[in-house]
Image (tube, rainbow, N blue to C red):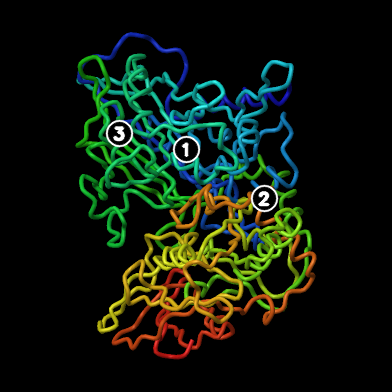
Amino acid sequence: MSHRLTALALFFAALTMGGCASRPISPAPPPAGTRATLAILESTDLHSNVLSYDYYKLSEDPSLGLERMATLVHAARKEFDNSLLFDAGDTIQGTALADWQARGQPLPCDRELAIYKAMDRLGYDGATIGNHEFNYGLPYLLQVTGQPLASAGDAPRRCSGPAFPLVLANVIDIATNQPLYPPTALLERSIKARTVDGARVDVPIRIGIIGFTPPPILLWDRNQLEGKVRTLGIVEAARKYAPALRAQGADLIVALSHGGIDTRAYSDTMENANWHLAREPDIDVLLLGHSHQAFPDPGNPKARYNDLPDVDNERGFINGKPAVMANMWGKSLGVIELALEWRDGHWRIDPQGTHSEVRDIRAADGTPVAADPAIAEAVRSEHEATVAYVSAPIGDSDFPMTTYFAAVGDVSALQPINMAQRDYVRRYIAENLPALKDLPVLSAAAPFKLGFGGATDFTAIEAGPLAIRSAADLYLYPNTLTAVKLDGTDLKAWLEKSASYFNQIDPSLATPQELVNRKVPSFNFDVIQGDIRYVIDISKPVGERIVDLRFGGRAVQPEQVFILATNNYRGSGGGGFPGTGSDHIVFNAPDMNRSILVDWVRQRGHLGFSEDGNDRPWRFAPLAMAGPLVFHSASGELDLARRAGLAGVQLVADDGDGLSTYSIDLGRPQ
């Protein structure tokens, strides 16, 4: 009971901390022409990065963290008379802190999740549910978000959840045929405004919020969700629920949509459907996420949104609607400055005075803002327990395991995963599926951390003692193992899909060419091992690059059959790889890939480089390049490329942000 009272106290305290008062307000409308500025503040893809801390390295990381983003929130609330703070999802998963609360020491019903405790301190006004919220399963998700939990013979009970409303319009509970969460919420606030004669007044405003998550969750977390929920397309859900918000008197409707911007033809399973959502008349403002990108991103010539139709990457508009995406991990705060005018009995957005921006927690010179000490204090006990949890020893190694050069062939951080997965599948088949015991077992693993998030976004485990945190660094996500059966044609097609991670190269060009296609996430760059060898010719178009595929030294035949160990995301169809889906799945294991890795290291005790970290299954096809072929990785790590046998890798230049430009000579032996 005391915790419930504390949570409620925090809730009402939060209402007074925010920039819009939520006390009872007069129904009297303001005079026509009254104007106000309302700042909509957004976080997204926090992934449980409450603190500026790297649990894999056991060290501070000032480049991220809600505790520093909180300082930007406080500054914005001082800057703007009126503000609201929302989150666009992927909140409860992503760090060792999240794993400890979900798996290491499961959270009691009366305890609030650490990330939500911190968000309550900041006084959030609302949030939605991202795709990674489903990774730990529906029972856990419903528990930590304070939703009704079925209890045999008893009335449904609720556990501690956040003090702010969670909305989600496009996930339906199959058992009840009702939305899993409230699809919308109507927030009644009082804002400071000015009448046409300059008088300052406090006036009412009603803001509706509606939430969306990517419909492909049914593929990505099939094990957790199949038969339990179904999804609606994002546009269909908006058309179903947003008009009711307007009918309730919402002046503005804000979409909290965990997705990015895709201008291709719409479908009801579209992952990033917000370009289409912005065309809906009952959606006024969009708060986006999922893509781990900033929008708007003015002045960045490489921004993926520069040339999209009806997308303003300078001022932050999509099809005429203001929008923002605040990057990831608490690295930045999204801010939409809405210029409002009271006309025709409603608040209207003035597009000319409205703009969006993404505010980074680091200054231009890289100096981070100070952390809000109240956030660290709120989660002190959880943080200390997590540090102890990830420090538990599991073995040792005589080689560093890194992803610095995984894009050019280093497998030091991938081979242990693949070896652990192969061993697990072999044992499982021998014990449970003896009819398959003679089929060769392969394994696929991808470098989850390959620099997309900056210089610290790499797996980097030093030689020496290994702990649980080492396995969590190697295997970032709480996936479970899945085994699929595929033939030689599927295997080649799988590798072709993986090879789309690289740009098509023109060897005749004298100018530098980028090796990596940054539009393809590194978690879709699968490396397959198990007495297999293949060559990737990046001068060829996507789908035609695997030019020599061998198993046991012999060319793989189309009709050959293999068992491939992967994870539930990939096996269920995540990433769109051939050879996946229910028709190919042999079994879904109950164990997490990371737990399988931990058990394998414990059993092995010691990992050696020649046996466990240097079995390179693939190489680039030799190419005589007229100009340099470049890629980017952490600075000062060239010796690791040499250790991995990558003689063609050379340092080109320091990029000045902790990353360096490297080149690879495909004319030299690999």
Residue 382: percent from left, percent from top: 71, 44
Location of residue 76 (image quadrant): top left
Residue 580: percent from left, percent from top: 50, 53
From the viewer's side, name the closer residue of 131 and 488: 488
Residue linked to disc 1 = 87
Q: CA distance from mark 2 to mark 1?
A: 33 Å
Residue linked to disc 2 = 589
Q: Is residue 26 above or below residue 366?
A: above
**As shown in the figure, which amino acid type bears the numbered disc 2?**
Ala
Q: Residue at (71%, 26%) from the top-left corner?
A: 3
Q: Is residue 637 above or below residue 282?
A: below
Residue 371: percent from left, percent from top: 56, 49
Which badge, 1 or 3, is on the more N-terminal residue? Answer: 1
Disc 2 versus disc 3: nearer the observer = 2
In this rendering, position of residue 58 left or right of residue 665: right
Residue linked to disc 3 = 338
Verify CB contact (< 8 Å) between mark 2 and mark 1. no
From the viewer's side, name the closer residue of 109 and 162: 109
The kind of secondary structure element at disc 2 is strand
Which badge, 2 or 1, is on the more N-terminal residue? Answer: 1
Q: Which residue ends up furthest to the bottom in the rendered image? A: 668
Mark 2: few/some/many CA within 10 Å (<14, 14-19, 20+): some
Question: Where the N terminus falls, by quadrant?
Answer: top right
In this rendering, position of residue 133 left or right of residue 279: right
Q: Residue at (28%, 44%) from the top-left corner?
A: 316
